């Protein structure tokens, strides 16, 4: 692994997104590494089930088949912590093709090799001896090689170097031999891909023109996916899929599949803090020692009894029962069957006053009667404290849609997944369910949402699902509120996130929940500054909300934006673009899809289709 030789700093939460297992991480000084699989994160001297790294979230663990959540280990030297010293996240070098930025000499290096310098083998360039050839006797003067920027990616998650040798020799009629060496050059008469040229010492040459065409590698050189998974070592799958040629820094090389959850404590208020601490420690300790999801009750009782020796202010019966209940993962009546059921649990908690300042969730709910001009809402909750758990499940390439399979992030089926926990604050907006249902049943509203449905069905992103107009409305409002809050709260809009509580599709017996949580949760100092909650008090949030709707009435791209019949990927949005509604990737939980300002403020053809227009003068 490359980290055997060098140390590169990366934030712990960045290993969940945007740089998780299988992602290409660009480091300074033209370094390019790929994060290795989970099998290599912990060595024989360290275990993933160390209580210091385990994150407790029993509700989310049930949702993910009883997986244990583990924070990526942070590096510490032996002086800081002798028991957790020298823990690293390993990585491999990728791409493996490198070239000299001075003379163009190319070499394919090993995945675990140290960063190489040019060998100085290229003797002449344009009839002159190269700088590298002249200084080959002085290795320290030779430049470091730079990773090639062209790679080949498979929809099944595989990735490999662009097959330069095969591409160069495709028309030459000359065979590839062991003595063949490549030279890279750029420039010439073109600044396009045709200006990137590879020349072999055997005389074969080719540029990159046409390499990015669909199925170019399969059609032109009969080259298909070899099933390469460099993040898992030399293991390969039997694939044969057609490859996509991309640049290694392209956004569609790696899409993280992340599940997030708002942590909901289940303690009654009268339980002492020492009892809560005992339960928390017990869950962490016994999470990985279950046998077929059955906890060791004898060991748990002994553990609680040992805790009482240190502090007798512990409710023994409660602590034992809570630890056992948290570790049981197969209780069907407590296991949410769908994402909507899972979120309904959070919705019910966030729309009422609960928790205390000493707990990880502290919510104060206020009826909308205490606010002015927001009659379409039912209540507003100020979430003074919350804890979010973010779990990395896997990744996809080419497209984030579930049509592509999740790539494996470990060689073996491990009992744990990498995760981070973030603390923060937020504002929960609960809308009037009945008002939204009446609005959503209007023919004009249904016709407008049908435009998005038809766009997605043409691209085979929907089959028989019916989009819920209420979801699109709430999702768009949430984006508008985030933009308005970022100007007042002290947070950038990239630091504020949304969590929508509404079914995305229409189906029988949908849960009654219509609202969204605007929150910030981070592991660093921007996690809980208090600025967001302060904007939610009466006398402030009204202006923020009304300003958000007012700003949505005009976009710098209008009338093109408001008249659009489909924007974004596969036409998933209508009146929504970067000038008005779209947010940074860190803020939107649905990848900036299913948005439409027209449902908020109406269109040029139908003003009254906008939900908020009926309340404009209130």
Image: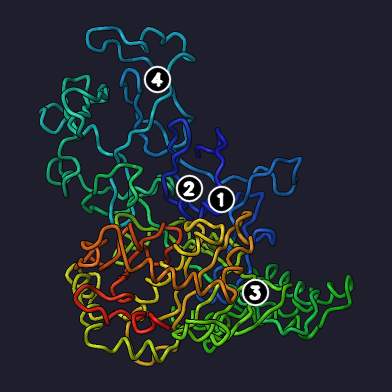
Q: N-terminal of the two: label 4 or label 2? A: 2
Is residue 311 shown above or below 154?
Answer: below
Which residue corresponds to mark 1?
41
Q: N-terminal of the two: label 3 or label 2? A: 2
The mark found on residue 118 in the picture is 4
At mark 3, the secondary structure is: loop
The mark found on residue 36 in the picture is 2
* Residue at the image point whose x is 89% and y is 77% from the top: 312
At mark 1, the secondary structure is: loop
Which residue corresponds to mark 3?
361
Within-10-Å neighbours for mark 4: few <14, some 14–19, many 20+:
many
* Contact flag, marks 1 and 2 (Cβ < 8 Å): yes
Between tags 3 and 2, which lies in front? 3
Q: N-terminal of the two: label 3 or label 4? A: 4
At mark 2, the secondary structure is: loop
The image shows residue 462 at horizontal and vertical percentages of 24, 74
């Amino acid at each position: 692994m490359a980290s055997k030789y060098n140390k590169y700093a990366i934030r712990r939460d960045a290993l969940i997104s945007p740089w998780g297992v299988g992602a290409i991480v660009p480091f300074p000084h033209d370094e390019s590494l790929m994060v290795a699989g989970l099998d290599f994160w912990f060595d024989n001297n360290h275990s993933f089930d160390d209580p210091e790294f385990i994150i407790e979230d029993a509700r989310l663990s049930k949702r993910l088949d009883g997986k244990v959540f583990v924070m990526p280990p942070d590096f510490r030297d032996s002086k800081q912590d002798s028991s957790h010293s020298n823990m690293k996240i390993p990585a491999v070098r990728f791409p493996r093709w490198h070239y000299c930025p001075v003379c163009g000499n190319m070499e394919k290096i090993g995945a675990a090799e140290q960063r190489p310098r040019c060998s100085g083998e290229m003797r002449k360039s344009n009839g002159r001896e190269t700088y590298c050839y002249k200084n080959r006797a002085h290795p320290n003067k030779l430049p470091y090689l730079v990773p090639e920027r062209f790679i080949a990616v498979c929809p099944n998650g595989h990735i490999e170097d662009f097959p330069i040798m095969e591409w160069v020799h495709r028309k030459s009629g000359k065979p590839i031999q062991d003595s063949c060496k490549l030279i890279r050059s750029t420039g010439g008469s073109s600044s396009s891909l045709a200006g990137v040229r590879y020349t072999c010492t055997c005389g074969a040459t080719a540029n990159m023109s046409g390499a990015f065409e669909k199925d170019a590698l399969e059609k032109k050189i009969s080259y298909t996916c070899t099933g390469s998974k460099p993040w898992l070592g030399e293991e390969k799958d039997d694939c044969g899929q057609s490859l996509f040629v991309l640049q290694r820094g392209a956004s569609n090389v790696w899409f993280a599949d992340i599940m997030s959850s708002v942590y909901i404590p289940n303690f009654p208020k009268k339980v002492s803090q020492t009892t809560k601490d005992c339960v928390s420690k017990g869950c962490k300790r016994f999470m990985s020692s279950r046998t077929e999801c059955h906890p060791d009750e004898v060991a748990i009782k002994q553990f609680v009894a040992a805790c009482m020796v240190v502090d007798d202010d512990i409710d023994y019966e409660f602590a034992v029962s809570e630890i056992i209940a948290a570790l049981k993962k197969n209780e069907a009546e407590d296991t949410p069957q769908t994402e909507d059921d899972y979120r309904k649990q959070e919705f019910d908690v966030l729309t009422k006053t609960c928790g205390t300042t000493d707990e990880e969730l502290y919510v104060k709910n206020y009826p909308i009667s205490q606010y002015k001009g927001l009659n379409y809402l039912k209540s507003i909750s100020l979430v003074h404290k919350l804890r979010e758990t973010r779990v990395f499940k896997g990744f996809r390439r080419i497209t984030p849609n579930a049509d592509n399979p999740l790539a494996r992030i470990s060689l073996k089926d491990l009992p744990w997944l990498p995760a981070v926990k973030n603390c923060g604050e937020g504002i929960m907006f609960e809308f009037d369910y009945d008002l939204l249902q009446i609005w959503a049943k209007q023919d004009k509203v249904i016709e407008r949402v049908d435009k998005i449905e038809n766009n997605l069905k043409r691209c085979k992103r929907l089959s028989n699902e019916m989009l819920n107009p209420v979801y699109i409305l709430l999702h768009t409002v949430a984006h508008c509120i985030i933009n308005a809050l970022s100007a007042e709260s002290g947070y950038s809009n990239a630091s504020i996130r949304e969590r929508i509580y509404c079914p995305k599709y229409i189906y029988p017996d949908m849960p009654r929940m219509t609202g969204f949580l605007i929150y910030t949760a981070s592991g660093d100092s921007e996690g809980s500054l208090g600025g967001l909650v302060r904007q939610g008090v009466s006398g402030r949030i009204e202006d923020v909300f009304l300003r958000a709707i007012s700003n949505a009435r005009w976009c710098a791209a209008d009338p093109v934006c408001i008249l659009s019949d489909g924007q974004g990927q596969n036409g998933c949005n209508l009146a929504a673009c970067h000038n008005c509604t779209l947010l940074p990737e860190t803020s939107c939980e649905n990848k900036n899809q299913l948005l439409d300002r027209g449902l908020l403020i109406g269109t040029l053809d139908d003003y009254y289709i906008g939900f908020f227009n009926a309340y404009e003068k209130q």
